[in-house]
Amino acid sequence: MAKKIFLLVTSLFIVVTVVFYNHQFKPFQGKDKTKETVTTTSSTEKKETVKLPGKVDDWNLVLVNDATEIKEEPKELKALPDGHEVDSRIYTDYLNLTEAAKNEEIDLVIISSYRSVEEQRGVVATEIAQYESQGHTHEEATDLAMKYVTVPGHSEHHTGLALDVLDTTWYNDGHLLEEEFGATKVGKWLAENVCHYGFVIRYEKGKEKITGINYEPWHIRYVGKENAEYMYNNHLALEEYIDQLKK
């Protein structure tokens, strides 16, 4: 009899202990979980804002493309040592780029720099004539020419901020503005280093639908050092960068 009473008391003690434990600790565990959820949600809602280096109306970010005609041609041009003219504000940075190239035993040669709207009309006419001389109709020749040349008034060369550059070895071997230049040692060096001097490869491979221009590894465009490095690091065409600045 005493043994039964002992077992009954022991069982009651265990039940009371369990009920007491659940009452004391479960609510606190629930509160902790709720707190953790709120903390996690709060940290998720915080969005890091990235400050872009440029402003959409900066002089070095002027956009000229198939859809946007140049509003005003540069007023102050300066001739580089070889006679090619550029906007005077990029003169020093381009010379610094050429010096850096020389340190890598690269001798850059300019094929084209500033070109007026009137000169662009002459370029287009010449390209069309060349294709016509190969037997193409005028319509076919125009279509072929416009794959690489732009409508007068819509060329970046009107800005004085763009240059077509090759190296003397490539040029002296009889090569001109060809996509294969991008795969050469010099083409790769330009792609990786022009941003340090304020330039970008304006028409990159894979960006044709955005820029409206085929890949041109020789065409460098001045946008300013901070803008250039941001665009290079984030793999942005000028159109994409300006879209970000507008947001």
Image: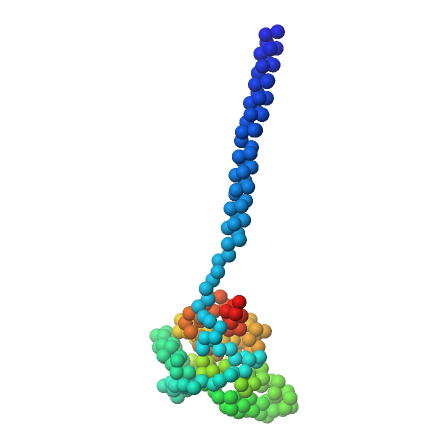
- The residue sitting at 52% across, 39% down in the picture is 32
Left or right: 92, with 203 as reference point = left
Q: Quadrant of residue 86?
A: bottom left
Q: Position of residue 124 (x, y in %)?
A: 55, 89
Colour mode of the rendering: rainbow
Total labels: the figure holds 0
Whether residue 105 can be seen here: no
- The residue sitting at 52% across, 80% down in the picture is 64
**Camera-nearest residue between 125 and 42:** 42
Q: Position of residue 157 (x, y in %)?
A: 48, 83
Q: Position of residue 7 (x, y in %)?
A: 59, 13
- The residue sitting at 51% across, 77% down in the picture is 63
**Camera-nearest residue between 28 and 198:** 28
Left or right: 144, with 39 as reference point = right
Q: Position of residue 178 (x, y in %)?
A: 51, 80
Q: Quadrant of residue 34?
A: top right
Q: Residue furthest top?
A: 1
Whether residue 9 can be seen here: yes
- Image quadrant holding the N terminus, namely top right
**Camera-nearest residue between 189 and 207:** 207
